[in-house]
Each structure stands twice: as structure tokens, then as C-alpha cells.
Image (cartoon, grey):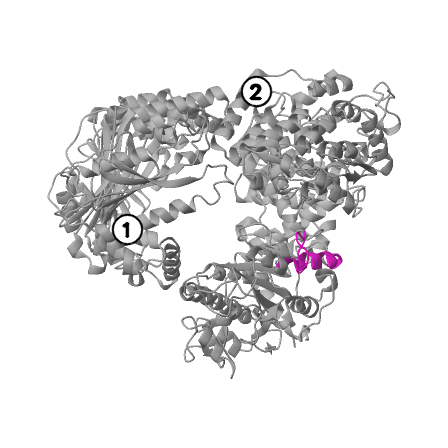
């Protein structure tokens, strides 16, 4: 894919953004302190690079009721009360339909922004939420108690090219997701713009601004004898300078108004924040968000419908916004869930923990494709769908073909990639 | 807290005098605020035990030490020197009468116009003050135009923005000349269209009384004309809790000509009221679930159980609300209901909330908290002693409802055994106990817990019992039994209450005293030394004991709805 | 017994003078920060008397009474928050801060979290053990830990049964508590685990569950027999790797982040010769050439506890312990709840771009509001508010920072102070805020 072709649009959006936020705000640091560490921080802005948004569907999404093989009789037989009626589903092609709640995704599909990877899983699937989620995050199915995650290791391996920036950001309330835990690179988790800022402390706005710029300038000091990259003080100065520069960009991003309205859902708000950070060049190349509640053991329809509506609505708004600001080609959003659910519904109008499921990729920068076929509904593994694509193949694809990071150190092995197109 | 003390400190320096004839302001106001004999009220409050306690407290003294307080005191000193009299006299003179502030709409401008009228309590002191203030008026320079008129009247004008009138008996200030002129006519006791005669404020006066220490009235019809018919009230709420508590009230308020607030104070307490006009019949049927029948008592009084600390009793046709949630709430809020119903099904296997549970619910729910004695622990005592809590549900269908609640109780009680071992709690089994001829279900620890410093979880023992059409969930057997006895007695006759909240601060003080060391530790954790912490607790206890009762209730009438908040102190 | 030699030899204070900077360096390392008065006192007392005072201070009854109140509160409520407040109060107010500093060192060494143990009482008992042996005997501590109720719960001791050995404790004993990676084999872990079978806990107390103890022959480090847990601990202590492991940890915690092999070997030798007696080891360390060497000065990145309590102590502050513990959790050092059995690795891992912002924001909150506590420093008679901006900057840098600032930085700060509007106190607050937000303030 040719990234340079997107440049004019990106520059235009940057210009517009700078116009809104006031170029002074962003450039102030550089202007008042053309210092040592600031150079790294400024150089680090991920201007034309690609961005991966990882969306976790926590709880185990029922893939079978998300992308529906509407031609298979077994689906209707095994899901007597939960099956989506043939007429209601949103038809994608002769074999597959989307759940009717996913009108948002259908729109993305019709615009050529949606890819689906079917039958994703891993060998000897584990059906515990905790363990299976760990496996998806660590990408090491065989080893328990891994201390880092696949993206964490990827960042460590790419560390040299990430110097002086915040490579990833999780919009989470809890601790850092394991996928982003790294040995050498630190990833902040924030809930929103307010969590990552440099306080000006007491005094009026001017006094606060004075202090903030002095703190930035003093952190950006190239002292005597403390310039060795291995020196702890140099490390502290570098990190502080990056932090302050990133905080400035995040603060400036607050004035970036979405070009399109977002639904007022939790996911909608978080994706809106991400779009804002992307438009403001805050820096991270990877964003992590999750949507929780997919553990639908009973009365699945109501809860699942609500979640799919939230998913479809928020991602549609996200891409409408990105398209309008010319950024959709730079962004790829990938969904995953710790497992799919049993093919056969249970006795309380729900479904229990299963195995293989699909992943969605949404982006304006890849060719829309439906990868692989829908797993068989008759040839099952203890009642669960069998995977034909290992999730690590998808990870390898995203790392190598999208982010341009080496996949082997991240996945501790080589995996056959898909064609992103 | 500090601000409150500062405020009280400031009031503490003011003093009393008698009342005055009512002031009238011009008609057409959006809202008005009226205060009568502020100085006198302050004296009465100052003489109460409560305020003595406050002024003796270390916090109050500390507050007086604060820089803001010192600035305030210094400012007052300066003012006294300037005025040549003490501020107590000044405040008596100025605030002993009546003060009214009203806001008027002005075409083409967002900010309203204002008129302030003040009738002084002591004309002689006022006269003296005016003499002292003359030089200051001169200092204001050319911007301020001053015209002396016969009869001791000074007319002032500051550019085109402020118009004032100083009279021997008071003063008037307005932001528009014509408003000042109309106000002047009324102030002099002549006839003219007056604020109190407008339909909204007339209704306010008629329904909530005309003489109060403080009154705030809003002409909702005028507001609607100016700010739109719905005044920002959404047609559908997006939060279930807010809908249940406020939506029907907001709808009623939109039909009311006024919104009124009144406050009365004396040395033994205060009485705050808020009201609107209109009754259940004035709102559309989908909002009537909130209102009890004006002819009925609505929510029952709190049951008199031993050691009652407080509680609330609420009339609400929950089923009536729930069945309309799709109408009342936005699309966004709907999934919450689905999640709630799925959750309830886990606790009530095989039962559908809307089908099976709603019809069984009655029209009121009561929550109470009361001291417990822990006899059920067989000698053991928790280190932290919490009160017992209970929920009493009114059942529309006692038989089916009772079964459902019993099922719910059993499921919850069983769930509490999961994880018991991890938290170090002894597991328990359910037992039935006869009490006054009624069955009480509760739990029994397999081994009686020993010691006087048991973990906090030992404050909670689930109990369930049904008395007639009431189902009791309690966290303590003492309270459950107390409720069983109380609920068997016929409830005393009472006036209509839609929502009733009562608090007995003396009992709260007992609770605080029983856990004194833990409270003290909390103060120390915040950075106080133990002696200061102890003084803080002592003050808190004395304050709580000085307050006799705090009560909040709302009443539904055929043509009015009112909230009251009453406090009584010693 | 031989005396310490070479880099561990005591500094000869007759050869070079004992300065305020030396006193500040000693106090920041041996306790949680140092106030101006404490630095003055240590300066007057001299090096030897100051170390002696750190080791044997005068106890305070008032402090112990308040501490008892806070501990009882934690026991009564069973709340982790109250438990943390109790300990943080000790760290800040104890008349024997070195003991608390080492208690925290041992808490990190034997990192156990209340999130799994779930009992405040059991966690407090483990903390008591760390405190009792803080300046005591490492062997006693290691033996105590192997029978400690919190440790048994934390590392699944009750699951360590005769036919199904659970290796969790044995593995961590060898890897994290006594020897370090590379000094044992997987076989050693298996054998050691067998020796600890049946070392259980019942009713929050150690309980030897005889029926679950493996009475067979085990072989560890070449020694065979019906070994039990106590034997394993003793065998570990006798391994040369043990004093080395401890020496390296002490050096990185108290002296410098990347000690040389020679320094580790030298201290290990002293640890062994002093029979793991911590008071002697710490006394020698705090008197040594290495400790006062140029490379050690300001070389450690402050832990969140050092940062927060240190700032409060330096400014004569009275912490709001509830706010402080929230802050510590945010900064990544939630005491009584380390993330894993490895504890906090510390050093550069304390620092992330987000945590540096939080650290700077803490400085703003501390001097700008009283949400973290109140600071008496601004009212201190020691403070010369009327001094020139340059002098004030110099004085504050001397009090707060481990190393002198570059003149250029000092200039910028003085100019800032001179240009700040408001009362002398407001201006001082502004200067303090900026100074404590410096990367230099993150070191000690």
C-alpha cells in the first residue's frame, strides 16, 4: 500500500487542527526550549504512520450470532430460540449475514471498510475467561504466568524506533491490559483527557502557564555530564520531556471537535477520544479499548443485541469521523474476544463458553476481504467451532503488514500471514 | 465546612431589631427573593445551644484564624472606623427591616434586569450612616450623578446602568429607570400593578403563605415564555434513577404557574418548604405512578422499632413506572432494563420480572436503620458495630409476593456462603424461628463466633419475614423482630406523605460513640494529632446531640405538591 | 572479627569534612526524607553519632500510642486502607525511621499482597515480623517467613501436600528470597518443595500438618536426609550465593543502582562475616567510603514512598494518610499490595511518562493545596522569606535536591521566583512546586 498518497489529506487535517487548537499551544515547548530531549519528543510524532486500534470484546462474543451463516440448516436447528431469522439478518453475500443490530457494521461493509477473518482460534482452546484472555493477550498459549504481552514485546523489539514517544495508550479504567505490558516500554492507561496532564498548580492561568513551561524547559535541560543515554538523570529528563510534550498534545486535542456525532455510549465516547488523539497527533501507534458484557449465559438476545448495537454504532461513528478528517486510511481497528460460544444454545436462552470465532478488521487503508470460510457447524470440537486460522497469524499480519514491526520477537515464533491487500 | 463556619462567624457579629411593613415591587418579575428581619433571625439563632456549640468548637476558632476570616474581620474594623459606629448597630438598622430583590426580563438581552428594595429597621441610624457615606459618593466622581430632593431623598444614577434612590426609610436600586420609578410609587405606599398580584405569585402566596423569614418565588409561566415551554426538561430521561425520582415531578412543575421556596427560622429549629401548584390529575396518566392519592396517607410512617436511627418511607407505584420505561426513557437507557431483568432472573430462577414480580409489588417501600444488640452471635461482638438495616416491601398480592421474596431471600442467603471461607467468616445455614406467632427465617453460624473483635461481616445476618402484606428483609434479627412487632400494630393515622425521611441525630451520636476509636483513627489518618481528633469527635457528638430531629417529607394535595425539610434543635 | 576494608572501609572524617550534603545524603537513604532541622542536627552531631542515632534512637511513647490506635482501627475494620494508613503513619512518625525503611525493604523482598491474603491481621503479623528483624537477623527472618501465615497463603502453602508438592514457595525461596536465579536447579526446587510439604496454616497460624508432610529422603545442594523446611532454609543460608544475593539487593536499595561486582563481593563478604546481623551490616554500610562516594550521590531513583513521604518530611509536613495511600497506588507503590511476588523492581521501572506527570502533579498539590497534607515549612523560622531570589533558590535546592543544580537552572528558577506575583509565601510555593517537579527531585 502506498502511504504517501494519503499525505495531502493528512496535512490538511493537521492544518485544520492546528488552526483550531492554536499552533502556539503545541509548538510552545519547542519554541521556548529548543533543548536536547525535546528534539526526540518532537521527532516522535507519528505523523503519517499507521495506527492500530485494538478493541476487546470481553466476556466471549457469540460469533455465530454476530456473523451468521444463513444458509446452514444446522444453525437454525442448534439455535431454536436464539437464531436470527433469515429475513431479519443483514445479508453480506450468499453465505453470510450480519446480526440485524449491526447496521453500523453493514454500512462500513457497504463502504468497503470492513474485513472479516473467520474461524480464528488457537489449538487446544481453553474455556476459562481468565486463562483464554491471557492467551490472547500474551500470545503464548502454552505458558502460564507470562509477564508481558504480544504488543509489549513488539514495542520492546521496536524500541529503537520508538525512542521519545508514548508508543501505545490504553483507554481503560483498570490496570494495563496484559497485551501492552512490556519489559522496557511503558504504556499509560487513561480514562480520558483529564488523566494525562501536567498541573499548573496554584495561581491564575498565567502563573500556571509560567510554571508549566518552566517545568518543561528545566526537564529539557542538557546538563553537564548527564547526557549519556544510560545515565538515570538523562533517562528521567527524556521521559519527562516526552510526557510533557504528549500531555500538551492531549490537552490541545480537547479542542478537536468530532466531525460527526458519536453515540453517547461508553465505547462511542472512548472511540471519540481516540479519534481526537489521532487527529491531534498525540503520538501512540496502538490504542486499546474494550467493550465488556459478552458473557451471555442466559437471556442472551437482549444483552447481546444491546452490545452489538453499541459496537456497530460506535465503530460506524468512528470511521465516519475519520473519513471526514481524511484519517481513515491511517487507522485499522481490529476486534477480538477470548472465545466464541457453544454452537448449541443452552437451556436458559443463552450460550456457554466456546472456541473459534471471527475477528473484524475495519480500515480505510486495506482492501475489504472476507478471509477464510465459516467453520463447519457439523464437524465440531466437543460442540465448539474449529478454528482454521490461528490468532497469532492475524497478529503477525497486523504487526508486519500494518505497523511494520517485526512479528517474531512479539509472537516468539513465525506465523503464516494473511494478505491484508 | 470551613465556609459554613465563616458564614456563621460573620452572622455572629450581626444583631437584632423588629419587623416592618411589606415592600411591594413592580409586576412582571421572573423571580423574587424576599427576606424579613434578617438581623432578628440571626439573634434568635445565635442564642440557641447549637450555635453556642459551634462557636465553642475548635473548628470555628480555627476558621476565625484562617486568612480569609482575618481579612473579613479587618475589613469590618475598617468599615466601623469609616462609619463611626459599630457594625452590629449598622446591621440591626439595615437588616432589621425587609429586603426584596426581583428580576425582570428585558427584551433583546439575556441578562435580566434587577430591582432591590430595602426598608431599614432603624431610620435614625440609617440617617447617620447616610451622612457618613456622603463623602464616598463624591469620590465616585462624574460617573455618579446625584440629585438631592426634598423630604430627605437622594436620587443617584451611575451612567445608564444603575439607578438608585435613598429615602429616610430605606433604599431602592434598579438597573432600569422605569423599574425604579414604578418601584418608587409602590414603595411610597401608592397603588400600582404589583408583583404579588401576578397570577403566579398570588397563587404562591395563597398556597405557601405570605409571611416567612425568607421567600423565593419563580414565575414559571413567565419563565416558559422566555426560555421555552419545557424549560430544558427532556421529554425522555436517560437515567432510570433520575426518572424514578424526578421525572413525574418535573412534568408537574411544567404545569405549575410558580415554583416557591420558603424558609423560617427560630431558636429551636428551621422549616424549609418548596412547592408547586397542581395535583396528580394535572399530569398525563403516564406520570401518575409517582403520586399517592391526596386523600390517602400515601407512604406509611416509619415503624417505631427500638433504637431507631432513621429511615425513609416512599410511596411509589414502581410497577406503574417500570411498565412504561420504554415511553419514559430514551433508547439508550433501555439496555439497562434488559440487564436488570437478566440479573433478577439469576436470583429468581424461572421467574420473569415484568410478568411475575411486578404484579406482586405494592405501593410503598420502607428502609430503616436501628441499633442492634448482637445477641444472635451468642456472645461474640464485631469490633465495628454497625446498625441493622431493613427494607420493608409492601405486597399487592401477599401470597405470591411472599413466596417470591422468600425465594429471593433464600438465594441471596445461599450466595453469601460462597467465599465465606476466604473472608474468614464462619459459614451459616438457614433456620426458621417462631416469633410472636410468625416465622422468621434467618441464618445460624455453624460455630458461634467468639471474641469481641469480630470482622465487620458479623454485623450482617440476613433475616426475612412476612407480616401480612409486608415482607421484611433485615440485616439483623433484633431489627427484624422489632419490625414484626411494629408492623402488626395498626399504623397510626397520618396526613399524606409521598416520601418521608427521618433522622434521629441523638441515636446517630450513640452510633458514633460506640465506634469512637475508629472515628478518631480516621481523623488521625487525615493528619490530626490524637488530642485534636478527640476534640473533633466531642464536638461532633455534642452537635449531634443538640439536634433533636431532622425530617424531610413531601405531600400530595389535589392542587399542590410540597416538600418540607424540618430541623429541631435544643 | 575483621574490620571492613577497601570501599567498605569507614570514611575518615578527619581527612575530609562532614558536610550538610553528607548529612542529607545519609538521612534520605536511611529514612523517608529529611527536614532541615534533622539535617542540622546530624551536621552538628557528626557522622558516627548520626549513624548511631539512626540505629538506636530514643523511643516516643506518644507515637506508639497513636500507632496503636491506628493499628486497632485496621484490625477492627479489617480494611486494607486502614492497614496501609497504620504503616504509613509509622513510616512518617516513628522515632525509629530506619526500622520502617528496612521493614519496607523486607516487605519488598518478601513481597506479599493483601489482595490474595485478604486478611489485614495476617498481613500486619507479617509486617511485625519484618519490623522485628528489620535490623535483626536475616536467618531468623527467613525462617520466620517460611512459617508466616500471610506467606503461606500467598504462595499456596496449604496446597503443598505429601503426594502433590506445590513448588510455589520453594521456587520463590530459592529464586527471590535467598539465592537468585542461576544458583539452583529445577531439581533443587522439587526437593525443597517436598521438605515444605505439610507446612500449612490453620486459623491464621502456622500449623505443621504431619499427615501431609513428606518424610522421605530429599537431596539439596549435595546434602541428603529427611530434610524439613527449616533444614532447607539453613542450607540456603549456607550457600555462598545467599550473602551475595542479599548484598546486591542492599546495595541497589541503599547505595547505588548498578553496583560493581567488586562492591557486591565485598559487601557479601561482610554480610557473611557479620553472620547476617543487619544492624552491623547497615551500620558499616552507612559509614563506608562507597556509601559516601561521588557515584552514589543522588544515584537512586526515588520510590513513590521516598518521593511522597520524603517531600512531606523535607517540608515539615503532616501527611493526610488517606490521600497519600491513594497517591502511592497511583504512582505504582501500593504498600501491602505489591503487583507480584517479585515485588517492585524499582529503579527506572518506577518511572513512566504518566507517573512522571503524576509526580510533578503531586508537587503542585502538596504546595498548592492541603489535599496531601499540611506543610509547616512555610511558617518555619529557618526560612528567610526576605532573602534574594538567588539565595532562596540555593537554600531550597540544598534542602531538597541530592545534587547541586547547574548554574543555568538555578538562574532560571531564581528568575521565576523574582517574576512571580503575590505574597512572599505564594512566590515561595511557586518556586517549591517547580523545584519538586524537576527530574532531579526524582533522585536521592
Query: Given the image, what chain letter belongs to the residue carrying mark 2?
Result: C
Residue furthest left as drawn: B191
Query: Given the image, what chain letter belongs to the residue carrying mark 1?
Result: B
Q: Using the image, determine if residue B83 lies above or below residue B427.
A: above
- Image coordinates for residue C412, horizontal then vertical, percent: 68, 39
- Image coordinates for residue B422, horizontal then vertical, percent: 52, 41
Question: In the figure, is residue A329 to the left or right of B226?
Answer: right
> Is disc 1 placed on a helix, strand or loop?
helix
- Image coordinates for residue B462, horizontal then vertical, percent: 36, 40
**Does the magenta portion include A141?**
yes
Task: Tell me, for residue B217, which label it has, or none.
Answer: none
Q: Are marks 2 and 1 in contact (CB under 8 Å)?
A: no
Q: Using the image, determine if residue C56 lies above or below residue C418.
A: above
Give the total number of marks visible in the rendering: 2
Q: Which residue is mark 2?
A: C63
Residue B472 in sight from this viewpoint: yes
Location of residue B471 by image quarter: top left
Residue furthest bottom as drawn: A94
The boundaries of the magenta stretch are: A137-161
Task: Tell me, for residue B403, which label it has, or none.
Answer: 1
Q: Residue at x 42, y 39 (%)?
A: B428
Q: Using the image, determine if residue C22 lies above or below residue A321.
A: above
- Image coordinates for residue B234, horizontal then vertical, percent: 31, 59
Query: Along the line of sight, which residue is nearer the eye, A349 or C97?
Result: A349
Location of residue C262 by image quarter: top right
Query: Along the line of sight, which residue is nearer the eye, C136 or B434?
Result: B434
**Does the magenta portion include B416?**
no
Amino acid at each position: 500500500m502506498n502511504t504517501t498518497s494519503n499525505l495531502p489529506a493528512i496535512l490538511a487535517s493537521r492544518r485544520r487542527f492546528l488552526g483550531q487548537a492554536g499552533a502556539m499551544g503545541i509548538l510552545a515547548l519547542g519554541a521556548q526550549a529548543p533543548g536536547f530531549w525535546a528534539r526526540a519528543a518532537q521527532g516522535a510524532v507519528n505523523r503519517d504512520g499507521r495506527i492500530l486500534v485494538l478493541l476487546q470484546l470481553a466476556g466471549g462474543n457469540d460469533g455465530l450470532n454476530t456473523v451468521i451463516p444463513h444458509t446452514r440448516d444446522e444453525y437454525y436447528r442448534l439455535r431454536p430460540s436464539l437464531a436470527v431469522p433469515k429475513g431479519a439478518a443483514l445479508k453480506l453475500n450468499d453465505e453470510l449475514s450480519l446480526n440485524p443490530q449491526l447496521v453500523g457494521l453493514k454500512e462500513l461493509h457497504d463502504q468497503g471498510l470492513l474485513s472479516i477473518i473467520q474461524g480464528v482460534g488457537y489449538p487446544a482452546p481453553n474455556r476459562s475467561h481468565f486463562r483464554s484472555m491471557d492467551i490472547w493477550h500474551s500470545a503464548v498459549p502454552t505458558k502460564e504466568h507470562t509477564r508481558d504481552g504480544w504488543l509489549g514485546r513488539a514495542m520492546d523489539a521496536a524500541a529503537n524506533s520508538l525512542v521519545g514517544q508514548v508508543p501505545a495508550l490504553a483507554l481503560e479504567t483498570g490496570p494495563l491490559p496484559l497485551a501492552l505490558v512490556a519489559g522496557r516500554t511503558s504504556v499509560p492507561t487513561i480514562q480520558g483527557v483529564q488523566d494525562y496532564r501536567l498541573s499548573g498548580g496554584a495561581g491564575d492561568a498565567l502563573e500556571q502557564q509560567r510554571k508549566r513551561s518552566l517545568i518543561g524547559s528545566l526537564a529539557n535541560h542538557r546538563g553537564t555530564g548527564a547526557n549519556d543515554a544510560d545515565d538515570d538523570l538523562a533517562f528521567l529528563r527524556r521521559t519527562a520531556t516526552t510526557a510533557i510534550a504528549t500531555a500538551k498534545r492531549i490537552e490541545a486535542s480537547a479542542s478537536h471537535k468530532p466531525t460527526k456525532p458519536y453515540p453517547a455510549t461508553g465505547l462511542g465516547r472512548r472511540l471519540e477520544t481516540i479519534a481526537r488523539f489521532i487527529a491531534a497527533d498525540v503520538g501512540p501507534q496502538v490504542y486499546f479499548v474494550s467493550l465488556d458484557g459478552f458473557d451471555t449465559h442466559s437471556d442472551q438476545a437482549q444483552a447481546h443485541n444491546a452490545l452489538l448495537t453499541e459496537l456497530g454504532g460506535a465503530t460506524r461513528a468512528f470511521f465516519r469521523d475519520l473519513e471526514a478528517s481524511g484519517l481513515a486510511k491511517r487507522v485499522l481497528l481490529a476486534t477480538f474476544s477470548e472465545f466464541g460460544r457453544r454452537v448449541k444454545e443452552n437451556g436458559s436462552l443463552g450460550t456457554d463458553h466456546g472456541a473459534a470465532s471471527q475477528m473484524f478488521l475495519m480500515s480505510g487503508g486495506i482492501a475489504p476481504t472476507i478471509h477464510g470460510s465459516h467453520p463447519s457447524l457439523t464437524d465440531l470440537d466437543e460442540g465448539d467451532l474449529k478454528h482454521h486460522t490461528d490468532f497469532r497469524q492475524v497478529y503477525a499480519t497486523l504487526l508486519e503488514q500494518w505497523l511494520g514491526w517485526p512479528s517474531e520477537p512479539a509472537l516468539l515464533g513465525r506465523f503464516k500471514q494473511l494478505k491484508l491487500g | 465546612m470551613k465556609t459554613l463556619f465563616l458564614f456563621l462567624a460573620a452572622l455572629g457579629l450581626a444583631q437584632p431589631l423588629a419587623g416592618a411593613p411589606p415592600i411591594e415591587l413592580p409586576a412582571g418579575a421572573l423571580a423574587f427573593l424576599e427576606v424579613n428581619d434578617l438581623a432578628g433571625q440571626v439573634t434568635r439563632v445565635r442564642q440557641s445551644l447549637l450555635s453556642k456549640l459551634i462557636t465553642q468548637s475548635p473548628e470555628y476558632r480555627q476558621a476565625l484564624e484562617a486568612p480569609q476570616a482575618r481579612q473579613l474581620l479587618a475589613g469590618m474594623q475598617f468599615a466601623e472606623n469609616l462609619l463611626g459606629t459599630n457594625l452590629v448597630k449598622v446591621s440591626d438598622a439595615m437588616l432589621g427591616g425587609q429586603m426584596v430583590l426581583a428580576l425582570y426580563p428585558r427584551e433583546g438581552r439575556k441578562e435580566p434586569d434587577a430591582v432591590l428594595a430595602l426598608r431599614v429597621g432603624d431610620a435614625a441610624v440609617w440617617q447617620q450612616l447616610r451622612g457618613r457615606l456622603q463623602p464616598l459618593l463624591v469620590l465616585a466622581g462624574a460617573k455618579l450623578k446625584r440629585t438631592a430632593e426634598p423630604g430627605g431623598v437622594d436620587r443617584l444614577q451611575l451612567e445608564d446602568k444603575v439607578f438608585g434612590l435613598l429615602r429616610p426609610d430605606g433604599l431602592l436600586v434598579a438597573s432600569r429607570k422605569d423599574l425604579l420609578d414604578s418601584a418608587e410609587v409602590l414603595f411610597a405606599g401608592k397603588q400600582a400593578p404589583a408583583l404579588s398580584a401576578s397570577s403566579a405569585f398570588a397563587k404562591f402566596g395563597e398556597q405557601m403563605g405570605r409571611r416567612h423569614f425568607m421567600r423565593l418565588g419563580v414565575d414559571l409561566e413567565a419563565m416558559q415564555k422566555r426560555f421555552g415551554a419545557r424549560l430544558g426538561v427532556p421529554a425522555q430521561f436517560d437515567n432510570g434513577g433520575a426518572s424514578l425520582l424526578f421525572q413525574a415531578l418535573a412534568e408537574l412543575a411544567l404545569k405549575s404557574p410558580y415554583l416557591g421556596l420558603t424558609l423560617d427560622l427560630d431558636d429551636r429549629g428551621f422549616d424549609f418548604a418548596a412547592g408547586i401548584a397542581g395535583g396528580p390529575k394535572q399530569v398525563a396518566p403516564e406520570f401518575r405512578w409517582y403520586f399517592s392519592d391526596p386523600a390517602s396517607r400515601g407512604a406509611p410512617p416509619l415503624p417505631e422499632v427500638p433504637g431507631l436511627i432513621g429511615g425513609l418511607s416512599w410511596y411509589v407505584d414502581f410497577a406503574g413506572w417500570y411498565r412504561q420505561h420504554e415511553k419514559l426513557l430514551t433508547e439508550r437507557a433501555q439496555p439497562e432494563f434488559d440487564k436488570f431483568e437478566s440479573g433478577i432472573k439469576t436470583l429468581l430462577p424461572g421467574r420473569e420480572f415484568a410478568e411475575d414480580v411486578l404484579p406482586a409489588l405494592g405501593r410503598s417501600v420502607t428502609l430503616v436503620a436501628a441499633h442492634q444488640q448482637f445477641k444472635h452471635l451468642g456472645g461474640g461482638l464485631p469490633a465495628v458495630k454497625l446498625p441493622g438495616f431493613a427494607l420493608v416491601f409492601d405486597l399487592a398480592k401477599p401470597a405470591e409476593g411472599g413466596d417470591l421474596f422468600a425465594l429471593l431471600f433464600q438465594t441471596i442467603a445461599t450466595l453469601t456462603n460462597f467465599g465465606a471461607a476466604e473472608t474468614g467468616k464462619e459459614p451459616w445455614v438457614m433456620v426458621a424461628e417462631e416469633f410472636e406467632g410468625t416465622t422468621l427465617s434467618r441464618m445460624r453460624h455453624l460455630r458461634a463466633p467468639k471474641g469481641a473483635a469480630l470482622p465487620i461481616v458479623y454485623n450482617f445476618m440476613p433475616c426475612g419475614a412476612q407480616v401480612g402484606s409486608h415482607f421484611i428483609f433485615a440485616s439483623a434479627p433484633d431489627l427484624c423482630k422489632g419490625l414484626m412487632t411494629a408492623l402488626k400494630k395498626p399504623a397510626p393515622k397520618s396526613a399524606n406523605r409521598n416520601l418521608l425521611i427521618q433522622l434521629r441525630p441523638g441515636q446517630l451520636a450513640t452510633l458514633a460513640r460506640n465506634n469512637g476509636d475508629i472515628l478518631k483513627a480516621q481523623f488521625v489518618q487525615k493528619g490530626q494529632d490524637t488530642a485534636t481528633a478527640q476534640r473533633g469527635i466531642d464536638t461532633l457528638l455534642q452537635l449531634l446531640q443538640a439536634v433533636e430531629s431532622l425530617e424531610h417529607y413531601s405531600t400530595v394535595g389535589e392542587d399542590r405538591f410540597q416538600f418540607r425539610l424540618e430541623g429541631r434543635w435544643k | 572479627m575483621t574490620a571492613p576494608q577497601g570501599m567498605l572501609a569507614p570514611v575518615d572524617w578527619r581527612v575530609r569534612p562532614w558536610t550538610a550534603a553528607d548529612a542529607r545524603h545519609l538521612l534520605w537513604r536511611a529514612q523517608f526524607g529529611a527536614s532541615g532541622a534533622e539535617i542540622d542536627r546530624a551536621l552538628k552531631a557528626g557522622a558516627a553519632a548520626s549513624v548511631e542515632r539512626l540505629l538506636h534512637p530514643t523511643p516516643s511513647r506518644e507515637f506508639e500510642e497513636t500507632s496503636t490506635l491506628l493499628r486497632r482501627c485496621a484490625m477492627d475494620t479489617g480494611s486494607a486502607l486502614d492497614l496501609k494508613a497504620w504503616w504509613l503513619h509509622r513510616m512518617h512518625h516513628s522515632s525509629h525511621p530506619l526500622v520502617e525503611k528496612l521493614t519496607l525493604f523486607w516487605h519488598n523482598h518478601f513481597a506479599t499482597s493483601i489482595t490474595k491474603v485478604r486478611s489485614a491481621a495476617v498481613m500486619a503479623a507479617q509486617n511485625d515480623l519484618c519490623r522485628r528483624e528489620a535490623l535483626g537477623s536475616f536467618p531468623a527472618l527467613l525462617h520466620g517467613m517460611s512459617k508466616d501465615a500471610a506467606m503461606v497463603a500467598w504462595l499456596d502453602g496449604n496446597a503443598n501436600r505429601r503426594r502433590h508438592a506445590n513448588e510455589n514457595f520453594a521456587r520463590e525461596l530459592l529464586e527471590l528470597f535467598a539465592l537468585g536465579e542461576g544458583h539452583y536447579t529445577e531439581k533443587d526446587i522439587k526437593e525443597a518443595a517436598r521438605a515444605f510439604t505439610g507446612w500449612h496454616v490453620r486459623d491464621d497460624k502456622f500449623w505443621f500438618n504431619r499427615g501431609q508432610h513428606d518424610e522421605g529422603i530429599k537431596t539439596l545442594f549435595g546434602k541428603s536426609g529427611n530434610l524439613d523446611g527449616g533444614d532447607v532454609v539453613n542450607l540456603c543460608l549456607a550457600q555462598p550465593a545467599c550473602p551475595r544475593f542479599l548484598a546486591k539487593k542492599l546495595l541497589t536499595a541503599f547505595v547505588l543502582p548498578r553496583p560493581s561486582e567488586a562492591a557486591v563481593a565485598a559487601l557479601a563478604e561482610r554480610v557473611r562475616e557479620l553472620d547476617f546481623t543487619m544492624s552491623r551490616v547497615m551500620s558499616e554500610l552507612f559509614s563506608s567510603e562507597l556509601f559516601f562516594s561521588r557515584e552514589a550521590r543522588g544515584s537512586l531513583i526515588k520510590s513513590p514512598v521516598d518521593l511522597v513521604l520524603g517531600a512531606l518530611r523535607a517540608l515539615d509536613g503532616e501527611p493526610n494518610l488517606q490521600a497519600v495511600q491513594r497517591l502511592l497506588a497511583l504512582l505504582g507503590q501500593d504498600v501491602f499490595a505489591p503487583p507480584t511476588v517479585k515485588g517492585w523492581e524499582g529503579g527506572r521501572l518506577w518511572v513512566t511518562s504518566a507517573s512522571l506527570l503524576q509526580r510533578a502533579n503531586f508537587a503542585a498539590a502538596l504546595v498548592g493545596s492541603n489535599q496531601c497534607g499540611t506543610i509547616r515549612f512555610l511558617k518555619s523560622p529557618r526560612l528567610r522569606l526576605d532573602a534574594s531570589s538567588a539565595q532562596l533558590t540555593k537554600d531550597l535546592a540544598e534542602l531538597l535536591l541530592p545534587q547541586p543544580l547547574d548554574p543555568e537552572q538555578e538562574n532560571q528558577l531564581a528568575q521565576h521566583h523574582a517574576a512571580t506575583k503575590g505574597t512572599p509565601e505564594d512566590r515561595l510555593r511557586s518556586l517549591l512546586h517547580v523545584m519538586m517537579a524537576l527530574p532531579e527531585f526524582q533522585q536521592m
